[in-house]
Amino acid sequence: MFATALHTGHDLRSELSRLIGLDESTRLREEDPYTDYLAAVAPTRMVPNRSRFEVDLHRARGEAVYLGPQDAWGRDVWREKPSRAMIQRSLDEYDAFYDELKKLLTELEIQYGRFVIFDIHSYNYRRGGPNAQPEDPATHPEVNVGTGTMERERWAPVVERFIQDFRAFDFLGRHLDVRENVKFQGRQFAHWVHTNFPYTGCVLAIEFKKFFMDEWTGQVDPDQLEAIYEALKSTLPGIAEEMANL
């Protein structure tokens, strides 16, 4: 097992922090706090400290540095736009991440033959404001499992067992709403892995609705966060069983 939490980071290089046009709380709202805690469910993981506003590892390289509102939910990211040299330094980080990722996954491939990755994210569902009505639950599941970049038939037993076990978990006296490809289908990270390791790498792109926290203040409900961690952990035996049977 391998896990990532690509958007949990909040740090910016000093040269960029002087130019950023967004305040701390706005940046945090668009990042994925606490997903690094969830990624710890896997024994092997890559969890960047850098903010997605420095470089977004979950977008294609040509879109990885946000330059204007069209890249960042209509927000003016910069008071003063980064220079070409600054942008290149951010892209160097992007390249270094994927270079290191290829080395690590190649080692897993050699050692185990196949591997599963939890690509863990969270998403906002109260964009209208702290007192606004939440988005429609019919189109905003608590857990969205993205499988749109994989050869679905190849990995069907793993995907279906993961969803089955996740739904079955006793989540503080209820069951989570876990659905596949409703709001997200996976993006650059999953696409990269499935392109480079098409027969051996299975990425489950897991997006948690921020029901376990207040997306406007960043305040987390520790009981719900811990329960999500345990729910993820509960799926590991089933994944291992299905991988052994492939």
Image (cartoon, rainbow, N blue to C red):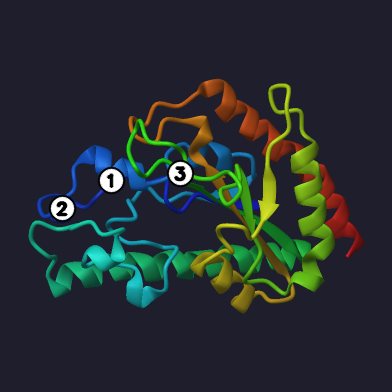
User: From the viewer's perspective, is 84 left or right of 163?
Assistant: left
Per the model, the C-alpha gap separating discs 3 and 2 is 25 Å
Badge 2 crowding class, 10 Å Cα cut-off, few under 14, some 14 to 19, many 20 or more, is many
| Amino acid carrying mark 1 in the image | Arg
- Under tag 1, what secondary structure? helix
| Amino acid carrying mark 3 in the image | Tyr
In the depicted view, which residue is nearer to us: 238 or 163?
163
Mark 1 and mark 2 in contact (Cβ < 8 Å)?
yes
Residue depth check, mark 3 versus mark 1: number of the one nearer the observer: 3
Q: Residue furthest right?
A: 245
Residue at 60% from the left image edge and 42% from the top image edge: 142
Give the percent coordinates (x, y) of residue 47.
47, 49
Mark 2 and mark 3 in contact (Cβ < 8 Å)?
no
Report whether residue 130 is seen: yes
Report whether residue 1 is seen: no
Per the model, the C-alpha gap separating discs 2 and 1 is 10 Å
Per the model, the C-alpha gap separating discs 3 and 1 is 16 Å
| Amino acid carrying mark 2 in the image | Ile
Q: Which residue is mark 2?
A: 20
Residue depth check, mark 3 versus mark 2: number of the one nearer the observer: 3
Residue at 76% from the left image edge and 44% from the top image edge: 236
Badge number at residue 146 = none
Q: Which residue is mark 3?
A: 125
Q: Earlier in the sequence, mark 3 or mark 1?
A: 1
Q: Which residue is mark 1?
A: 27
User: From the viewer's perspective, is 240 left or right of 55?
Assistant: right
Q: Earlier in the sequence, mark 3 or mark 2?
A: 2
